[in-house]
């Protein structure tokens, strides 16, 4: 178990506090005037999904969870769980939507991704930097509109809603960033 200083935490990291695993959702470094700096962190408990806020001193250390990574293929959604298959052993694994978080909005059937395991327990997935998704619903483009900053909402095949330029139509395949959830280009 490797220790990590509070100031070196990053969004998405997994840390162990007592016997529970927490994923870092948000963090903010605060340095008030003549006082010592601290780190304000928002955690999600991996096992029960509860959220917690903590204020850590700069010199505090946390135990970073050591994860095993396995290549797996996303198969289907089964209620509140998502089914993945190990590409080497063909063993199937169900992962709850709480463990996956917002990542579920980027999952397409038969997509191969990296699944993170803590021991034998799946705790999350590592998405590729971009995914190509089909537009299922959007308003038609306005002919003659020349405003360069004009955008419209588009619903994608996974249910994700992104802002797209006016030339994107229903049925188009677009590339979306998994970090920011923003439209990048046509695919």
Image: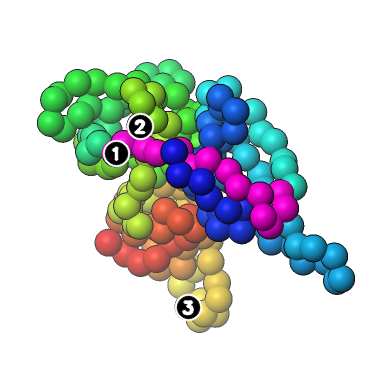
N-terminal label among 3 and 1: 1
Q: Looking at the rendering, in which quadrant would you find the C terminus?
A: bottom left
Question: What residue does disc 3 label?
Answer: 144
Mark 3 / mark 2, whichever is N-terminal = 2
Q: Is residue 84 visible?
A: yes
Instruction: Work out how far the residue at label 1 is from the one at label 2, CA to CA, in angstroms.
Output: 6 Å
Vertical comparison of 139 with 157: above or below? below
Q: Secondary structure at mark 1?
A: strand
Mark closer to the observer (3, 1):
1
Left or right: where 4 falls relative to 176: right
Q: Tag 2's secondary structure?
A: strand
Q: Whole-percent x and y of residue 135?
A: 38, 50
Q: Secondary structure at mark 3?
A: loop
- What residue do we see at 43% from left, 18% from top? 79
Toward the viewer: 169 or 124?
124
Q: Is residue 78 above or below residue 69?
A: above
The answer to whether mark 1 and mark 2 are in CB contact below 8 A is yes
Q: Which mark is residue 69?
A: 1
Point out the tag, 1 or 2, that comes first from the N-terminus: 1
Number of other residues with Cα within 10 Å of mark 2, as a class: few under 14, some 14 to 19, many 20 or more: some
**Residue 117, numbered circle:** 2
User: Which segment did they paint magenta?
Assistant: 56-69
Report, in whole angstroms, how far the alpha carbon at label 3 lies from the one at label 2: 52 Å
Q: Please identify the quarter of the rendering in which residue 111 is found.
A: top left
Classify 165 as above or below 93. below
- Residue 131 image position (x, y, % from top left): 32, 53
**Magenta segment includes 64:** yes
Query: At which x and y percent is residue 36?
Result: 79, 63
């Amino acid at each position: 178990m490797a220790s990590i200083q509070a100031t070196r935490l990053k969004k998405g990291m997994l840390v162990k506090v007592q016997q529970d695993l927490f994923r870092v959702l948000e963090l903010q470094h605060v340095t008030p005037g003549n006082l010592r700096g601290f780190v304000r962190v928002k955690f999600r408990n991996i096992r029960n999904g509860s959220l917690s806020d903590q204020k850590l001193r700069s010199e505090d250390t946390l135990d970073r969870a050591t994860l095993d990574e396995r290549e797996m293929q996303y198969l289907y959604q089964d209620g509140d769980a998502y089914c993945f298959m190990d590409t080497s052993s063909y063993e199937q694994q169900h992962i709850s939507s709480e463990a996956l978080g917002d990542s579920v909005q980027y999952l397409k059937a038969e997509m191969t991704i990296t699944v993170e395991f803590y021991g034998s327990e799946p705790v999350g997935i590592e998405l590729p930097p971009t995914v190509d998704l089909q537009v299922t619903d959007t308003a038609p483009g306005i002919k003659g509109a020349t405003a360069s900053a004009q955008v419209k909402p588009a619903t994608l095949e996974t249910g994700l809603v992104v802002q797209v330029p006016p030339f994107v139509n229903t049925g188009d395949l677009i590339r979306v960033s998994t970090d920011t959830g923003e439209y990048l280009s046509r695919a």
